[in-house]
Image (cartoon, helix red, strand yellow):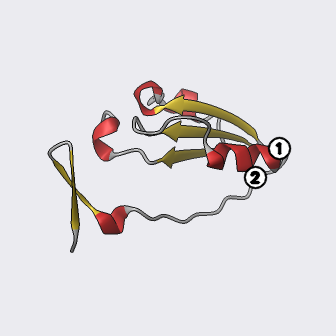
């Protein structure tokens, strides 16, 4: 399998894909977490807002890890967030 070298970490190129769907009653709220390499507005967040969802954006450094905080969201999207950017 092909590898990419980035900051002395090996990452599988095949891991750069995902798919999902969600059904939420009412308006729904989404937390979009952007990877540290991302800058500017998130196109995912913009599309979700255009569909009428409430969207909050944070960087991976500010990702809340406690379940009580995360339960306030119907969906959490990790946008270009590497595994090394999130504490276990």
Q: Left or right: where does residue 67 sit relative to residue 50?
A: left
Quick one: which residue is furthest to the front in this view? Answer: 40
Q: Is residue 47 left or right of residue 68?
A: right
Q: Which residue is mark 1?
A: 27
Q: Is residue 63 above or below residue 13?
A: above
Residue located at (58% from left, 40% from top): 32
Describe residue 82's horizontal placement relative to residue 39 as left or right: left
Could you say which quadrant of the image residue 36 lies in?
top left
Q: Residues within 10 Å of mark 2 (few under 14, many from 20)?
A: few
Quadrant position of the N terminus in the picture: bottom left
Given residues 12 and 75, the one toward you in this image is 12
Look at the picture and state if 47 lies above or below 84. below
- Left or right placement of residue 37 versus residue 18 in this view: left
Query: Where residue 24 is drawn, which disc sits there?
Result: 2
In the picture shown, does residue 1 fall above or below 82?
A: below
Alpha carbon separation for disc pair 2 and 1: 7 Å
Give yes or no for contact between labels 2 and 1 (Cβ–Cβ under 8 Å): yes
**Element marked by disc 2:** loop
- Residue placed at 64% from the left, 49% from the top? 44
Q: Position of residue 87 (x, y in %)?
A: 31, 33
Q: Quadrant of the C terminus?
A: top left
Q: Going 64% across and 63% down the picture, which residue do you hit?
A: 21
Within-10-Å neighbours for mark 1: few <14, some 14–19, many 20+: few
Q: Position of residue 10 (x, y in %)?
A: 18, 54
Q: Nearer the viewer, residue 86 or 8?
A: 8
Q: Residue 53: x and y, percent?
A: 78, 43
């Amino acid at each position: 399998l092909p590898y990419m070298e980035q900051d002395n970490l090996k990452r599988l190129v095949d891991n750069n894909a995902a798919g999902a769907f969600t059904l939420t009653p009412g308006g729904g709220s989404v937390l979009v977490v952007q990877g540290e390499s991302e800058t500017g507005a998130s196109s995912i967040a913009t599309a979700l807002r255009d569909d009428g969802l409430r969207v909050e954006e944070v960087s991976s450094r500010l990702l809340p890890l406690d379940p009580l905080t995360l339960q306030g969201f119907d969906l959490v999207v990790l946008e270009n967030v590497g595994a090394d950017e999130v504490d276990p």
